[in-house]
Amino acid sequence: MATVICPGSFDPITKGHLDIITRASRLFDHVIALVAINANKKPSFTAEERAEMIRKATAHLPNVTADTYEGLLADYVREKGAVAIVKGLRAMSDFEYEFQMALTNKRLVPEAETIFLTTQAENMYLNSSLVKQVASFGGDISDFVPPEVLNDITERLYRRKKEKSQGEVAPR
Ligand code: PNS
């Protein structure tokens, strides 16, 4: 049975992530969408909240599960006996960073491959940071995120933005 890991920040899951997870689920027996820690990012949702959103968005995919992990991806891959790490590649701008991670993971866990799936053209520009920005200003993000998690994201981010601006001292 071939297990693969789809790791990411998933802060929050977008339709681009879901597309990659869905396509991986057609190729492999078991896909674990793993909420991992990106040391360069400060997340808006807790790891468990992000995993729960993945579970809601992938409830129709029986061979997909979601998990969280605070350690090295390579250790998790080995622990699960996964055959590969599956990631989506958008533009060339993703390439260098992803290439570095793939080579590093290959050194740390040589028995697993990193497999890149090219993102669909309509998701080329999609990323979680922009989605959060649009949602925090009350914009419509229904084109960008799975419908099952739309409310979770908009309510939370819009409410937080409002609370923040109400707490700010009015300019004189
Ligand atoms: O969605 P992202 O933020 O591009 O995902 C990056 C992520 C979380 C997959 C990466 O930062 C990661 O693997 N973090 C776990 C810690 C780790 O193994 N770091 C070394 C990567 S070579």
Image (cartoon, rainbow, N blue to C red):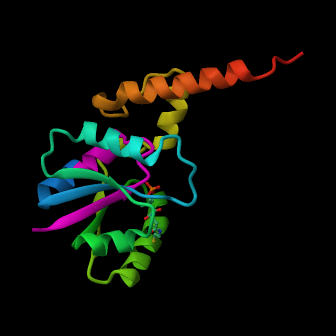
Compared with residue 64, is residue 80 higher up or lower down, i.e. above or below? below
Question: Which segment did they paint magenta?
Answer: 1-21
Judged left or right of residue 94, residue 169 is right
Judged left or right of residue 96, residue 113 is left
Residue 164 spot, x, y in % from top left: 66, 25
Please say whether residue 142 is visible from this viewpoint: no
Judged left or right of residue 39, residue 76 is left
Q: Residue at x 15, y 39 (%)?
A: 60
Residue 47 spot, x, y in % from top left: 43, 48
Q: Residue at x 27, y 42 (%)?
A: 55
Q: Residue at x 36, y 27 (%)?
A: 150
Question: Outermost residue toward the right?
Answer: 172
Residue 146 spot, x, y in % from top left: 30, 33
Please say whether residue 89 is visible from this viewpoint: yes
Q: Nearer the viewer, residue 50 or 97?
A: 50
Judged left or right of residue 125, residue 16 is left
Residue 5 located within the stretch drawn in magenta: yes
Compared with residue 41, is residue 159 higher up or lower down, i.e. above or below? above
Residue 156 located within the stretch drawn in magenta: no
Residue 94 spot, x, y in % from top left: 45, 59
Q: Quadrant of residue 6?
A: bottom left
Query: Quick check: which quadrant has ligand 1?
Result: bottom left
Q: Residue at x 39, y 81 (%)?
A: 108
Q: Quadrant of the N terminus?
A: bottom left
Q: Nearer the viewer, residue 2 or 22?
A: 2
